[in-house]
Amino acid sequence: MSEFRMPSLGADMEAGTLVEWLVQPGSAIKRGDIIAVVETQKGAIEIEAFEDGILDRFLVDVGTRVPVGTPLASIASAGQPKEQPGKPAGAPATAAAPWPPPEPPHMQPRPVAERPARGHGRASPAARRLAEQAHLDISIMRGSGPEGAVVLADVEAALRAAPVETRRVEALGLSQMRAAIATAMSRSKREIPHYYLAHTIDVMDARDWVEAINSTRPPERRLLMGALFVKATALAARAYPEFNGFYEERQFWKSPSIHVGVAIAIRGGGLVAPALHDAADLDLETLMTRLQDLTSRVRAGRFRSSEIADPTITVSSLGDRGVETLYGIIYPPQVAIVGFGKVVERPWISSGAVLPRATVTVTLAADHRVSDGHRGALFLTEIERSLKQPGSL
Amino acid sequence: MTPLEIRAVVQRELMRIAPDVDFDNVDPHADIREAFAIDSMDFLNFVIALHRSFGVDIPELDYPKLATVDGAVAYVDNKLGSAANNGHPLPQ
């Protein structure tokens, strides 16, 4: 028997509200099945199962807001007998409840909040009281007391490290989305030593290539330059793996998969950057279709938990409106974000002549704990190389 | 199809993409990308919607003609008119 918990859908998420169960007790579930809908600061998110099994019973009622890490349902392995009746709900995890669940090889280390809660359930009364007053979730804190119990000093330390910004912006009446962005970006600026590089690339050939393809296709099968930018970035991330993964617990975890988070603006303000899974392996048409699907679902306010939690690197692309250069802020625990400005025509020197060319300025913000400017420059040059051979994308 | 009917479809599609914008307050000569705050993907969806609603071919080279509400209505009207004049049945 194991537990299905409120997942952490990013560095900025502290809690979520269970909106809907999409399966009933007794049903068989497979890893990746959408089994619940959770309302977060980013909107309604479809939550996927982490493992195969039989949904045993619900531990949380619909409409309840619970901290990240809270068990939502118990899941029996297929063939395993159901949990014995009479055992109290929410009993401390035992050896029969492995956490984290066995992860398939392509999954990455999860954000810290999803790791096994040290001292789960154990805390001194004073610690509990202070945590409650401060709206901190004690179950995800690391305890320094006996047997990992959370003591008052731990809560005080957590308070000092807590995102004060969140409470301040809520006091100002700004939106939840804005608060979520503030939390994640403040953490990023506090913890990640960013370095920035910019490079202007001649994309005339890529643009002409896209135009030639699109001239033969109906609108629903046309490509956008943004799809090429995502693919070129994914290929560069494959060539330079130190830009693809997570920095957690004082070390870099290289990701074997390349899930590109694509920054998508939400009408009315804010943005999210859900994942295009395995972007380096998708041909451009498939990538474009997925991008359209992702954008429309984000705009409709409904996307999947894996899309929020999985990105291993982020791309922010301004499209054909906006300005020439965009400097991103890394979304923790990722280690790099690539920014594409709008495509602009500039005078460009090529073979000794000044010509009008379509160009784009691409930037990299990367984590200096993991990589240096030298490697960053090679990474951007790799993107340039791909975009100069659009047929190879 | 009258220009008024075409305008109603243009309005419906833009409101679907930008439900937060008050269509009646938008200058029909204003750039719709600015006026409705739409990006490249939204604009492509707008073109796809016009293509499906009217069955007219809209090559990328013609995108600038769709830059305003009035421009889009005139473009579709012109395309439908020339198709009828040439005796071609509408594709849809």
Image: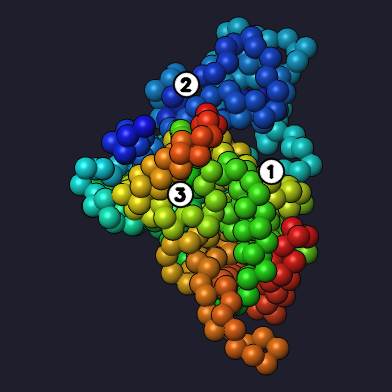
Q: Is residue A235 left or right of residue A357?
A: right
Q: Are marks 1 and 3 in contact (CB under 8 Å)?
A: no
Comparing B50 with A31, the one in front is B50
Q: Are marks 1 and 3 on the same chain?
A: no
What coloring was used for the rendering?
rainbow
Q: Within 10 angstroms of label 3, few (less than 14), some, or many (20 or more) residues?
A: some
In the rendered image, which residue does mark 2 sit on? A20
User: Which sits earlier in the primary sequence, circle 2 or circle 1?
Assistant: 2
Query: Could you say where residue A155 lies in the image, as x and y percent from the top left?
Result: 43, 48
Whether labels 2 and 1 belong to a single chain: the reply is yes
Mark-to-mark CA distance, 2 and 1: 31 Å
How many numbered tags mark residues here?
A: 3
Q: Residue at x 58, y 64 (%)?
A: A338
User: Could you tell me which chain the residue with mark 3 belongs to?
Assistant: B
Q: Which mark is residue B43?
A: 3
Q: Which residue sits furthest top?
A: A85
Could you say whether the residue bearing mark 3 is in a helix, strand or loop? helix
Question: Is A226 rendered above or below residue B78?
Answer: below
Label 1 belongs to which residue?
A286
* Element on which disc 1 rests: helix
Question: What residue lies at 38% left-to-right and 42% top-to-bottom?
Answer: B77
The image position of residue B62, as x and y in percent, is 49, 55
* Position of B19 relative to A205 (above/below): above
